[in-house]
Amino acid sequence: MTRLLFVCHGNICRSPMAEFVMKDLVRRAGREADFYIESAAVSTEEIGNDMHRGAKKQLDLMGVPYKKRAARQMTRSDYDRFDLIILMDEYNRTLAQRILGGDPEAKLKMLLDYTPRKGSDIADPWYTGNFEETYRDVLEGCEGLLENY
């Protein structure tokens, strides 16, 4: 079983969107037993809050199921619990490395590294307001990730 942790700044937009998109892709592929999937934040700003209404609206538009959840900050113990920690942007990587105390097993990956746009960031819709673009990027990354695992 591959254990995935999707990580963004606050765990209310990009990472929960990726969590639920990946869960939906895995379910559709009949591979639910192959994956364990969660999401978390690098910051403490949104701890306990549910997913942003814009992310929910976009998932609804695309027919992706989700459930009520509470944002959480990643912890050092997540490094041992997960096989891959999938980040949305380079700043997330910097903060994740700080929280985790490094990345000796090279578990930290960028979501778009599983696409032809390797090294690219997924824009934060908290700032851009463009949840549709974020969804497209997340879907592309999750599809590429699933193809590799």
Image: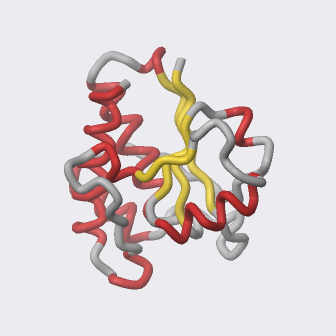
Q: Position of residue 12 (x, y in %)?
A: 53, 65
Placement of 31 over or under 67, stated as above or below: above
Report the colour scheme. Answer: secondary structure
Find residue 132 and report its image quarter: bottom left
Image quadrant holding the C terminus, namely top left
Residue in the picture at 46% in, 17% down: 34
128 versus 102 height, above or below? below
Residue extending furthest toward the front: 104
Task: Return the residue nearer the eye: 69 or 26.
Answer: 26
Say left or right for 125 vs 36: left
Image quadrant occupied by the N terminus: top right
Report the residue at 31% width, 43% height from top.
Answer: 114
> How many marks are shown on the rendered structure?
0
Q: Position of residue 100 (x, y in %)?
A: 74, 52
Residue 140, x across and y down, in percent? 24, 48
Residue 55 placement, left or right of 75: left
Residue 84 placed where, x, y %? 55, 37
- 53 vs 138, nearest the viewer: 138
Residue in view at x 27 percent, y 21 percent: 29
Is 82 situated left or right of 61 in this image?
A: right
Identify which residue is drawn at 77% across, 54% down: 101
